Image (cartoon, rainbow, N blue to C red):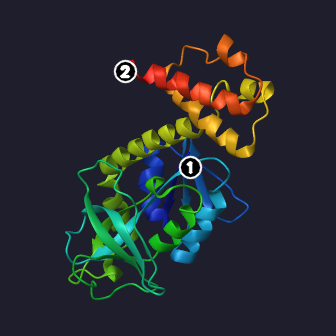
Amino acid sequence: MINLIVALQAEAKPLINHYGLNGRATAGGFRLYQRDDLQLIVSGKGKLAAAAATTFIADDNNHAWLNIGLAGGTSMTIGESALIDKITDHSSGQRWYPPHVINSPTLRCALTTVDQPQANGGAEHMLYDMEASGFYASASRFNSGELVQCLKVVSDDCHNPCQSVDAALGQELIEQQLDAIDHIIQQLRQLLTTQQEMFATPEHMARFLAQWHFSTSQQHQLKRLLQRWQALAPACSPFNDALLAQRHSRQVLPLLQQQIDEIESYF
């Protein structure tokens, strides 16, 4: 599932229309929209609201996360978008560094999350918002940092203060970045699929566990070996006479390792 976290309905509207998302009521009072593998939640303003909304839609499944919203700054043109590579919480000083895993022409920029809007545009080469630190601190508890990203669209600066940004302008600015958002979502889908394949239970795991007793640490080792086997020889079974002749798991693991090494030697 790809989760989109936005603060305001005006920011959400272009995304809802573009992706054909359907709304549904929630017990938590949030506005939630879904279709296929995409869901969007409108958190409301502020880092605490963003953290609450993120936690609300998290579950035990692997998700990718993207916070989309408006931000102020002085070093970029209004309407430009940026992938955030450093998030600083102004109140606490805590920092996060979203990994550079998205291949995109979109600019990269640092961002500070503040409790009140920056009326003077803030420091040079810095964007400002009110949600990212709450979002990132929460979402990174549920998946690795590679799958937690922020995209901000510049909406105001020292010449055009945030008070001048109304709902219509906010909606227009997000609409202008739909192609960039599409590109990022597609890459998050690919990263999520790769992660799910890496951590999925290998095909032959159950039979090994039924055949021999493995300790917890041995099960982790077995899983890694079978994932390698599955990647190298997906059409072949690892079970053969030599393997089935072994009585103990401590004999099975090195033999399986040897067989994998032999397969790799052919590549």
Q: Is residue 266 left or right of residue 2?
A: left
Kindly identify which residue carries mark 1: 63
Q: How many marks?
A: 2
Q: CA distance from mark 2 to mark 1?
A: 34 Å
Count neighbours of disc 1 (C-alpha within 10 A) and say few if under 14, some if 14 to 19, many if 20 or more. many
- Local packing at callout 2 (Cα closer than 10 Å; few below 14, some 14-19, many 20+) is few
Residue at 36% across, 70% down: 86
Q: Element at badge 2?
A: loop
Mark nearer the viewer, 2 or 1: 2
**Location of residue 254 with respect to 15 vertically, above or below:** above
Mark 2 or mark 1, earlier in chain: 1
Residue 36 seen:
no
Q: Quadrant of the N terminus?
A: top right
Q: Is residue 232 above or below residue 52?
A: above
From this view, report whether residue 157 is shown above or below residue 214: below
Q: Nearer the viewer, residue 266 or 178?
A: 266
Q: Amino acid at mark 1?
A: His
Q: Indicate the amino acid at tag 2.
A: Phe
Front position in the image: 98 or 83: 98
Expressed as whole percent of the image width and height from the top left, the position of residue 84 reads: 34, 64
**Label drawn at residue 151:** none
What is the x, y in percent for residue 53? 60, 65
Residue positioned 37% across, 73% down in the render: 166
Residue 232 visible in this rendered orientation of the protein: yes
Q: Secondary structure under badge 1?
A: loop
Q: Which quadrant of the structure image shows residue 267?
A: top left
Measuring 35% from the left and 58% from the top, which residue is drawn there? 174
Do the residues bearing badges 2 and 1 touch, measured as CB atoms within 8 Å?
no
The residue indicated by pointer 2 is: 267
Q: Position of residue 228 (x, y in %)?
A: 52, 30
**Percent position of residue 246, x then y:** 73, 21
